[in-house]
Image: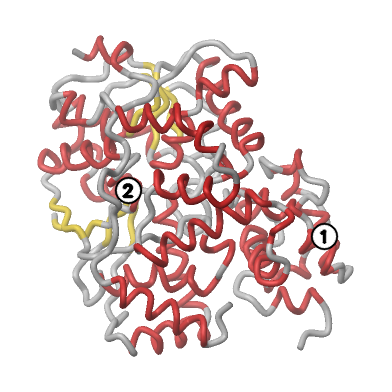
Amino acid sequence: MVYQYYPGCSLHASARDYDESVKGIMEKLALELKEVPDWNCCGATVIPSVNQWQAQILPARNLALAAENKGDLVIPCNACYMNLKKVQYNMAHYREVREKITQIFGQVGLRLVGMPKVRHLLEVIVDDVGLSKVKELVTKPLKDLKVVCYSGCQLVRPLGFDDPEDPQALDRLMETLGAVVLPFSKKSHCCGSSLMTTQPELALKMADEILEEAKKVGAETIVVTCPMCQLNLDAFQNQINSRFNRDGQIPVTYFTQLMGLAFGLNKNQLGLKRGIVSPAKVLEKIG
Amino acid sequence: MFTDFTSEIMSYPGGEKITACMQCGTCTGSCPASHAMKYTPRRLISLIRANQRDTVLKSLDIWKCASCYTCTARCPRGIKFTDIMYILKNLAWKEQRKEEDHNIFGFYSSFQDLIQSRGRMNEAELILRYSLKTNPYKLLEFAPLGMKMFLKGRTAIVPPGIKNKRQLQEILRISQERGGE
Protein backbone atom coordinates (compact mmCIF):
# COMPACT_ATOMS: atom_id res chain seq x y z
CA MET A 1 0.00 0.00 0.00
CA VAL A 2 1.35 3.41 -0.96
CA TYR A 3 0.55 6.56 1.02
CA GLN A 4 1.64 10.15 1.07
CA TYR A 5 3.39 11.09 4.29
CA TYR A 6 3.40 14.33 6.25
CA PRO A 7 5.82 13.88 9.17
CA GLY A 8 5.37 17.30 10.75
CA CYS A 9 8.16 19.41 12.24
CA SER A 10 8.67 17.47 15.48
CA LEU A 11 9.59 14.24 13.74
CA HIS A 12 12.69 15.88 12.33
CA ALA A 13 13.88 17.08 15.73
CA SER A 14 12.45 16.36 19.20
CA ALA A 15 10.56 13.29 17.98
CA ARG A 16 13.31 11.75 15.88
CA ASP A 17 12.63 8.49 17.76
CA TYR A 18 9.07 8.49 16.41
CA ASP A 19 10.34 9.06 12.88
CA GLU A 20 12.90 6.27 13.19
CA SER A 21 10.37 3.78 14.49
CA VAL A 22 7.82 4.71 11.81
CA LYS A 23 10.42 4.06 9.13
CA GLY A 24 11.46 0.88 10.93
CA ILE A 25 8.05 -0.77 10.85
CA MET A 26 6.93 0.37 7.39
CA GLU A 27 8.70 -2.37 5.50
CA LYS A 28 7.27 -5.08 7.75
CA LEU A 29 3.80 -3.70 7.26
CA ALA A 30 4.30 -3.48 3.47
CA LEU A 31 3.49 0.22 3.58
CA GLU A 32 5.25 2.72 1.39
CA LEU A 33 5.27 6.30 2.70
CA LYS A 34 6.16 8.99 0.22
CA GLU A 35 7.03 12.23 1.98
CA VAL A 36 5.17 15.24 0.61
CA PRO A 37 7.86 17.41 -1.01
CA ASP A 38 8.56 20.75 0.69
CA TRP A 39 5.77 20.48 3.27
CA ASN A 40 5.50 23.29 5.85
CA CYS A 41 4.51 23.60 9.50
CA CYS A 42 0.77 23.09 10.18
CA GLY A 43 0.71 25.97 12.68
CA ALA A 44 0.16 23.72 15.73
CA THR A 45 -2.15 25.34 18.31
CA VAL A 46 -0.21 28.59 18.17
CA ILE A 47 -1.06 30.05 14.76
CA PRO A 48 -4.83 29.38 15.09
CA SER A 49 -4.69 31.38 18.34
CA VAL A 50 -3.27 34.50 16.72
CA ASN A 51 -4.33 34.50 13.08
CA GLN A 52 -7.21 32.43 11.70
CA TRP A 53 -6.27 33.09 8.09
CA GLN A 54 -2.71 31.93 8.51
CA ALA A 55 -4.22 28.94 10.30
CA GLN A 56 -6.06 28.03 7.07
CA ILE A 57 -3.22 28.88 4.69
CA LEU A 58 -0.49 26.84 6.39
CA PRO A 59 -2.28 23.45 6.44
CA ALA A 60 -3.90 24.16 3.08
CA ARG A 61 -0.53 24.53 1.34
CA ASN A 62 0.32 21.01 2.49
CA LEU A 63 -3.01 19.76 1.17
CA ALA A 64 -2.27 21.43 -2.17
CA LEU A 65 1.16 19.81 -2.36
CA ALA A 66 -0.53 16.45 -1.71
CA ALA A 67 -3.52 17.09 -4.00
CA GLU A 68 -4.35 15.86 -7.51
CA ASN A 69 -5.47 12.43 -6.38
CA LYS A 70 -2.12 11.18 -5.23
CA GLY A 71 -3.65 9.07 -2.48
CA ASP A 72 -4.35 9.28 1.26
CA LEU A 73 -2.12 11.49 3.40
CA VAL A 74 -0.77 9.81 6.53
CA ILE A 75 0.15 11.93 9.56
CA PRO A 76 1.82 10.67 12.75
CA CYS A 77 1.13 13.77 14.88
CA ASN A 78 -2.23 14.45 16.55
CA ALA A 79 -2.01 18.22 16.17
CA CYS A 80 -0.98 18.19 12.50
CA TYR A 81 -3.75 15.66 11.86
CA MET A 82 -6.34 17.92 13.51
CA ASN A 83 -5.15 21.06 11.70
CA LEU A 84 -5.16 19.54 8.23
CA LYS A 85 -8.54 17.90 8.77
CA LYS A 86 -9.95 21.12 10.14
CA VAL A 87 -9.02 23.13 7.06
CA GLN A 88 -10.70 20.51 4.91
CA TYR A 89 -13.78 20.81 7.09
CA ASN A 90 -13.73 24.60 6.87
CA MET A 91 -13.32 24.52 3.09
CA ALA A 92 -16.25 22.12 2.79
CA HIS A 93 -18.53 24.10 5.10
CA TYR A 94 -17.62 27.76 4.60
CA ARG A 95 -17.77 29.24 1.15
CA GLU A 96 -15.75 32.27 2.24
CA VAL A 97 -12.86 30.08 3.37
CA ARG A 98 -12.99 27.91 0.26
CA GLU A 99 -13.09 30.84 -2.16
CA LYS A 100 -10.42 32.84 -0.42
CA ILE A 101 -7.94 29.98 -0.22
CA THR A 102 -8.59 28.94 -3.83
CA GLN A 103 -8.10 32.49 -5.04
CA ILE A 104 -4.92 33.14 -3.09
CA PHE A 105 -3.43 29.80 -4.07
CA GLY A 106 -4.34 30.43 -7.71
CA GLN A 107 -2.00 33.42 -7.71
CA VAL A 108 1.01 31.23 -6.94
CA GLY A 109 -0.06 28.22 -8.96
CA LEU A 110 -1.20 26.00 -6.11
CA ARG A 111 -4.31 23.92 -6.71
CA LEU A 112 -6.58 22.15 -4.28
CA VAL A 113 -8.23 19.77 -6.72
CA GLY A 114 -8.31 16.13 -5.70
CA MET A 115 -7.35 16.71 -2.08
CA PRO A 116 -6.12 13.68 -0.16
CA LYS A 117 -8.03 12.00 2.60
CA VAL A 118 -6.23 12.89 5.85
CA ARG A 119 -5.49 9.91 8.09
CA HIS A 120 -3.56 9.40 11.30
CA LEU A 121 -0.91 6.70 11.18
CA LEU A 122 -2.67 4.75 13.95
CA GLU A 123 -5.89 4.82 11.95
CA VAL A 124 -4.13 3.45 8.85
CA ILE A 125 -2.49 0.65 10.81
CA VAL A 126 -5.67 -0.40 12.58
CA ASP A 127 -8.12 0.10 9.70
CA ASP A 128 -6.11 -0.51 6.52
CA VAL A 129 -3.36 -2.89 7.54
CA GLY A 130 -5.61 -4.55 10.10
CA LEU A 131 -4.91 -6.15 13.43
CA SER A 132 -4.86 -9.69 12.02
CA LYS A 133 -1.98 -8.77 9.72
CA VAL A 134 -0.23 -7.05 12.64
CA LYS A 135 -0.65 -10.20 14.70
CA GLU A 136 0.99 -12.32 12.02
CA LEU A 137 4.06 -10.09 12.17
CA VAL A 138 4.56 -10.41 15.93
CA THR A 139 7.63 -12.54 16.63
CA LYS A 140 8.40 -11.22 20.12
CA PRO A 141 5.11 -10.69 21.93
CA LEU A 142 5.22 -7.88 24.52
CA LYS A 143 4.46 -10.50 27.14
CA ASP A 144 3.71 -9.19 30.60
CA LEU A 145 4.50 -5.63 29.57
CA LYS A 146 1.95 -3.53 31.43
CA VAL A 147 0.94 -0.47 29.46
CA VAL A 148 -1.59 2.34 29.56
CA CYS A 149 -2.70 3.69 26.20
CA TYR A 150 -2.73 7.46 25.94
CA SER A 151 -4.26 8.66 22.68
CA GLY A 152 -4.14 12.28 23.73
CA CYS A 153 -6.82 14.74 22.79
CA GLN A 154 -6.67 16.01 19.24
CA LEU A 155 -6.60 12.56 17.65
CA VAL A 156 -10.02 11.54 18.89
CA ARG A 157 -12.08 14.69 19.27
CA PRO A 158 -14.68 15.89 16.74
CA LEU A 159 -13.19 15.50 13.22
CA GLY A 160 -10.87 12.77 14.52
CA PHE A 161 -11.41 9.05 14.62
CA ASP A 162 -12.25 6.64 17.44
CA ASP A 163 -14.33 7.45 20.51
CA PRO A 164 -13.69 10.98 21.81
CA GLU A 165 -13.89 9.97 25.48
CA ASP A 166 -12.84 6.34 25.56
CA PRO A 167 -10.78 5.58 22.45
CA GLN A 168 -10.17 1.91 21.72
CA ALA A 169 -7.88 1.61 18.69
CA LEU A 170 -4.61 1.95 20.59
CA ASP A 171 -5.75 -0.51 23.29
CA ARG A 172 -6.66 -3.12 20.68
CA LEU A 173 -3.34 -2.64 18.90
CA MET A 174 -1.33 -3.06 22.09
CA GLU A 175 -3.32 -6.18 23.02
CA THR A 176 -2.54 -7.56 19.58
CA LEU A 177 1.16 -7.08 20.30
CA GLY A 178 0.70 -9.12 23.47
CA ALA A 179 0.89 -6.30 26.00
CA VAL A 180 -1.24 -6.13 29.14
CA VAL A 181 -3.45 -3.08 28.66
CA LEU A 182 -4.48 -1.57 31.98
CA PRO A 183 -7.62 0.50 32.48
CA PHE A 184 -6.77 4.18 32.25
CA SER A 185 -9.21 7.05 32.72
CA LYS A 186 -6.83 9.70 31.38
CA LYS A 187 -6.42 8.21 27.90
CA SER A 188 -7.78 11.23 26.06
CA HIS A 189 -6.94 13.97 28.56
CA CYS A 190 -4.80 16.92 27.57
CA CYS A 191 -1.00 16.89 28.10
CA GLY A 192 -0.88 20.70 28.36
CA SER A 193 0.50 21.25 24.87
CA SER A 194 2.36 24.54 24.36
CA LEU A 195 1.21 25.84 27.75
CA MET A 196 4.28 23.96 29.00
CA THR A 197 6.31 26.93 27.80
CA THR A 198 4.00 29.88 28.37
CA GLN A 199 2.18 28.76 31.53
CA PRO A 200 4.11 25.83 32.98
CA GLU A 201 2.22 25.90 36.27
CA LEU A 202 -0.90 24.84 34.33
CA ALA A 203 0.67 22.33 31.96
CA LEU A 204 2.78 20.62 34.62
CA LYS A 205 -0.40 19.90 36.57
CA MET A 206 -2.10 18.42 33.50
CA ALA A 207 0.88 16.19 32.76
CA ASP A 208 1.17 15.23 36.43
CA GLU A 209 -2.40 13.92 36.54
CA ILE A 210 -1.74 11.66 33.57
CA LEU A 211 1.62 10.41 34.87
CA GLU A 212 0.28 9.81 38.39
CA GLU A 213 -2.64 7.67 37.27
CA ALA A 214 -0.39 5.69 34.96
CA LYS A 215 1.98 4.96 37.84
CA LYS A 216 -0.87 4.22 40.23
CA VAL A 217 -2.46 1.56 38.02
CA GLY A 218 0.95 -0.09 37.72
CA ALA A 219 1.89 0.72 34.13
CA GLU A 220 5.47 0.20 33.04
CA THR A 221 5.16 2.55 30.11
CA ILE A 222 2.71 5.07 28.69
CA VAL A 223 2.07 4.46 24.99
CA VAL A 224 1.51 7.58 22.89
CA THR A 225 0.55 8.58 19.35
CA CYS A 226 1.73 12.20 19.30
CA PRO A 227 5.14 13.92 19.58
CA MET A 228 3.74 16.77 21.68
CA CYS A 229 2.26 14.36 24.24
CA GLN A 230 5.52 12.40 24.31
CA LEU A 231 7.60 15.49 24.98
CA ASN A 232 5.36 16.87 27.70
CA LEU A 233 5.01 13.54 29.49
CA ASP A 234 8.63 12.38 29.07
CA ALA A 235 10.79 15.47 29.43
CA PHE A 236 9.29 17.17 32.48
CA GLN A 237 9.09 14.31 34.97
CA ASN A 238 11.89 15.69 37.15
CA GLN A 239 10.19 19.06 37.40
CA ILE A 240 6.83 17.44 38.06
CA ASN A 241 8.23 15.16 40.74
CA SER A 242 9.82 18.00 42.65
CA ARG A 243 6.88 20.34 42.22
CA PHE A 244 4.18 17.89 43.28
CA ASN A 245 6.34 15.76 45.55
CA ARG A 246 6.03 12.60 43.47
CA ASP A 247 8.21 9.52 43.28
CA GLY A 248 9.40 7.38 40.42
CA GLN A 249 9.58 7.80 36.70
CA ILE A 250 7.76 6.15 33.85
CA PRO A 251 9.00 5.87 30.26
CA VAL A 252 6.77 7.22 27.50
CA THR A 253 6.97 5.23 24.26
CA TYR A 254 5.48 5.61 20.79
CA PHE A 255 3.16 2.83 19.63
CA THR A 256 5.43 2.43 16.61
CA GLN A 257 8.41 1.68 18.86
CA LEU A 258 6.50 -1.09 20.62
CA MET A 259 5.30 -2.46 17.29
CA GLY A 260 8.88 -2.59 16.03
CA LEU A 261 9.97 -4.34 19.17
CA ALA A 262 7.21 -6.94 18.85
CA PHE A 263 8.16 -7.42 15.20
CA GLY A 264 11.67 -8.32 16.31
CA LEU A 265 13.41 -5.19 15.05
CA ASN A 266 16.64 -3.98 16.61
CA LYS A 267 16.14 -1.49 19.46
CA ASN A 268 18.61 0.97 17.93
CA GLN A 269 16.50 1.09 14.79
CA LEU A 270 13.54 2.25 16.85
CA GLY A 271 15.02 5.26 18.61
CA LEU A 272 14.52 3.62 21.99
CA LYS A 273 17.67 5.26 23.35
CA ARG A 274 16.25 8.73 22.94
CA GLY A 275 13.76 8.83 25.82
CA ILE A 276 14.60 11.31 28.57
CA VAL A 277 13.22 8.62 30.88
CA SER A 278 14.85 5.52 29.46
CA PRO A 279 12.55 2.61 28.66
CA ALA A 280 15.54 0.20 28.58
CA LYS A 281 14.80 -1.43 31.91
CA VAL A 282 11.11 -2.14 31.42
CA LEU A 283 11.75 -3.42 27.91
CA GLU A 284 14.47 -5.85 29.04
CA LYS A 285 11.99 -8.68 29.39
CA ILE A 286 11.02 -8.42 25.72
CA GLY A 287 14.65 -9.20 24.85
CA MET B 1 -20.08 46.75 11.98
CA PHE B 2 -21.66 44.44 14.55
CA THR B 3 -24.52 45.36 16.81
CA ASP B 4 -23.11 43.37 19.68
CA PHE B 5 -20.32 41.01 20.67
CA THR B 6 -22.48 37.91 20.24
CA SER B 7 -23.16 38.62 16.59
CA GLU B 8 -19.49 39.39 16.05
CA ILE B 9 -18.53 35.96 17.44
CA MET B 10 -21.25 34.33 15.34
CA SER B 11 -19.79 35.82 12.16
CA TYR B 12 -16.66 33.66 12.41
CA PRO B 13 -16.41 29.95 11.50
CA GLY B 14 -17.19 27.91 14.61
CA GLY B 15 -18.93 30.73 16.50
CA GLU B 16 -22.41 30.24 15.06
CA LYS B 17 -24.07 28.27 17.81
CA ILE B 18 -23.14 30.42 20.80
CA THR B 19 -26.74 31.50 21.41
CA ALA B 20 -27.74 27.88 22.02
CA CYS B 21 -25.88 27.94 25.34
CA MET B 22 -28.06 27.03 28.32
CA GLN B 23 -25.33 27.69 30.89
CA CYS B 24 -25.15 24.07 32.04
CA GLY B 25 -21.41 24.35 32.70
CA THR B 26 -20.39 21.08 31.07
CA CYS B 27 -17.60 23.00 29.32
CA THR B 28 -16.21 24.41 32.54
CA GLY B 29 -16.52 21.08 34.33
CA SER B 30 -14.62 19.37 31.50
CA CYS B 31 -11.91 21.97 30.99
CA PRO B 32 -8.50 20.93 32.36
CA ALA B 33 -7.53 24.58 32.82
CA SER B 34 -10.75 26.03 34.27
CA HIS B 35 -9.52 25.57 37.84
CA ALA B 36 -7.04 28.37 37.13
CA MET B 37 -9.51 30.73 35.46
CA LYS B 38 -11.52 33.58 36.88
CA TYR B 39 -13.60 33.60 33.71
CA THR B 40 -14.28 29.95 32.95
CA PRO B 41 -15.74 28.78 29.61
CA ARG B 42 -19.33 28.99 30.87
CA ARG B 43 -18.74 32.45 32.30
CA LEU B 44 -17.03 33.60 29.12
CA ILE B 45 -20.11 32.65 27.09
CA SER B 46 -22.26 34.51 29.57
CA LEU B 47 -20.01 37.60 29.34
CA ILE B 48 -20.05 37.48 25.55
CA ARG B 49 -23.82 37.39 25.56
CA ALA B 50 -23.89 40.28 28.02
CA ASN B 51 -21.77 42.23 25.52
CA GLN B 52 -18.79 42.54 27.86
CA ARG B 53 -16.30 42.66 25.00
CA ASP B 54 -13.48 44.44 26.79
CA THR B 55 -13.63 42.29 29.90
CA VAL B 56 -13.45 39.13 27.80
CA LEU B 57 -10.68 40.20 25.44
CA LYS B 58 -8.52 41.65 28.19
CA SER B 59 -8.77 38.54 30.31
CA LEU B 60 -5.67 36.37 30.23
CA ASP B 61 -7.93 33.38 30.94
CA ILE B 62 -8.59 32.93 27.24
CA TRP B 63 -4.87 32.18 26.80
CA LYS B 64 -5.15 29.25 29.21
CA CYS B 65 -7.01 27.14 26.66
CA ALA B 66 -4.77 24.30 25.45
CA SER B 67 -7.15 23.44 22.56
CA CYS B 68 -7.95 19.93 23.80
CA TYR B 69 -11.52 20.14 22.43
CA THR B 70 -13.06 18.39 25.45
CA CYS B 71 -15.66 21.16 25.80
CA THR B 72 -16.54 20.84 22.12
CA ALA B 73 -16.84 17.06 22.36
CA ARG B 74 -19.14 17.30 25.37
CA CYS B 75 -21.32 20.37 24.79
CA PRO B 76 -24.95 19.14 24.74
CA ARG B 77 -25.90 22.06 22.48
CA GLY B 78 -23.21 21.51 19.88
CA ILE B 79 -21.31 24.71 20.65
CA LYS B 80 -17.74 24.59 19.41
CA PHE B 81 -16.24 26.38 22.36
CA THR B 82 -12.64 25.57 21.42
CA ASP B 83 -13.24 27.44 18.17
CA ILE B 84 -14.79 30.30 20.13
CA MET B 85 -11.65 30.44 22.28
CA TYR B 86 -9.59 30.69 19.08
CA ILE B 87 -11.83 33.54 17.85
CA LEU B 88 -11.43 35.36 21.18
CA LYS B 89 -7.66 34.94 21.15
CA ASN B 90 -7.50 36.21 17.56
CA LEU B 91 -9.49 39.32 18.44
CA ALA B 92 -7.46 39.94 21.57
CA TRP B 93 -4.20 39.45 19.67
CA LYS B 94 -5.25 41.93 17.04
CA GLU B 95 -6.59 44.60 19.35
CA GLN B 96 -4.93 44.32 22.69
CA ARG B 97 -1.47 43.00 21.97
CA LYS B 98 -0.52 41.08 25.00
CA GLU B 99 2.24 43.33 26.32
CA GLU B 100 0.59 42.88 29.71
CA ASP B 101 1.65 39.27 29.60
CA HIS B 102 5.10 39.21 28.20
CA ASN B 103 5.43 35.41 28.09
CA ILE B 104 2.33 34.82 26.01
CA PHE B 105 3.12 37.66 23.61
CA GLY B 106 6.73 36.58 23.32
CA PHE B 107 6.00 32.92 22.68
CA TYR B 108 3.23 33.34 20.12
CA SER B 109 5.06 36.02 18.18
CA SER B 110 8.33 34.04 18.22
CA PHE B 111 6.49 31.03 16.81
CA GLN B 112 4.79 33.13 14.16
CA ASP B 113 8.06 34.82 13.13
CA LEU B 114 9.84 31.48 12.92
CA ILE B 115 7.20 29.97 10.63
CA GLN B 116 7.13 33.04 8.44
CA SER B 117 10.88 33.07 8.01
CA ARG B 118 11.59 29.33 7.69
CA GLY B 119 8.30 27.54 7.05
CA ARG B 120 9.08 24.95 9.67
CA MET B 121 9.27 24.96 13.43
CA ASN B 122 12.18 23.78 15.49
CA GLU B 123 12.03 23.70 19.23
CA ALA B 124 15.56 24.86 19.98
CA GLU B 125 15.30 27.98 17.85
CA LEU B 126 11.80 28.70 19.16
CA ILE B 127 13.03 28.60 22.76
CA LEU B 128 16.02 30.77 21.83
CA ARG B 129 13.88 33.41 20.11
CA TYR B 130 11.30 33.30 22.92
CA SER B 131 13.90 33.73 25.64
CA LEU B 132 15.69 36.57 23.88
CA LYS B 133 12.36 38.31 23.38
CA THR B 134 11.14 37.92 26.94
CA ASN B 135 13.94 37.30 29.40
CA PRO B 136 17.34 35.95 28.31
CA TYR B 137 17.79 34.39 31.75
CA LYS B 138 15.13 31.90 30.70
CA LEU B 139 17.84 30.26 28.63
CA LEU B 140 19.45 29.17 31.88
CA GLU B 141 16.20 27.54 32.97
CA PHE B 142 15.81 25.73 29.66
CA ALA B 143 19.48 24.78 29.42
CA PRO B 144 19.48 21.53 31.45
CA LEU B 145 16.59 20.04 29.46
CA GLY B 146 17.97 21.44 26.22
CA MET B 147 21.27 19.73 26.91
CA LYS B 148 19.55 16.41 27.59
CA MET B 149 17.54 16.71 24.39
CA PHE B 150 20.73 17.52 22.50
CA LEU B 151 22.58 14.54 23.94
CA LYS B 152 19.68 12.25 23.03
CA GLY B 153 19.84 13.52 19.46
CA ARG B 154 16.47 15.22 19.77
CA THR B 155 17.44 18.65 18.47
CA ALA B 156 17.90 19.70 14.87
CA ILE B 157 21.53 20.53 14.16
CA VAL B 158 20.78 22.45 10.98
CA PRO B 159 17.74 24.75 11.33
CA PRO B 160 15.04 23.10 9.23
CA GLY B 161 13.24 25.12 6.59
CA ILE B 162 11.31 24.72 3.39
CA LYS B 163 12.73 25.36 -0.07
CA ASN B 164 9.94 27.47 -1.47
CA LYS B 165 9.88 30.08 1.29
CA ARG B 166 8.90 32.77 -1.17
CA GLN B 167 5.73 30.94 -2.12
CA LEU B 168 4.72 30.47 1.51
CA GLN B 169 5.51 34.08 2.39
CA GLU B 170 3.58 35.23 -0.65
CA ILE B 171 0.37 33.37 0.23
CA LEU B 172 0.62 34.47 3.85
CA ARG B 173 1.08 38.05 2.67
CA ILE B 174 -1.87 38.00 0.28
CA SER B 175 -4.13 36.46 2.91
CA GLN B 176 -3.14 39.33 5.16
CA GLU B 177 -4.13 41.95 2.60
CA ARG B 178 -7.46 40.33 1.82
CA GLY B 179 -9.19 40.92 5.08
CA GLY B 180 -6.83 38.75 7.05
CA GLU B 181 -5.54 40.11 10.28
Front in this rendered view, residue B141 or B81? B141
Q: Is residue A283 left or right of residue A2?
A: right
Number of callouts: 2
Q: Is residue A152 above or below residue A186?
A: below
Q: Is residue A214 above or below residue A126?
A: above
Where disc 2 sits, the SS reads loop
Front in this rendered view, residue A11 or A71? A11
User: Distance between the Cα atoms at labels 1 and 2?
Assistant: 37 Å
| Residue A75 on image: x %, y % | 31, 53
Residue holding disc 2: A76
- How many residues crowd mark 1 within 10 Å: few (<14), some (14–19), many (20+)? few
| Residue B124 on image: x %, y % | 40, 44
Q: Amino acid at mark 1?
A: Met
Q: Is residue B37 left or right of residue A189?
A: right
Q: Nearer the viewer, mark 1 or mark 2?
A: 2
Q: Amino acid at mark 2?
A: Pro
Q: Quadrant of residue A70?
A: bottom left
Q: Which mark is residue B22?
A: 1
Q: Residue at x 56, y 52 (%)?
A: B133
Q: Residue at x 27, y 35 (%)?
A: A17
Q: Quadrant of residue B87?
A: bottom right
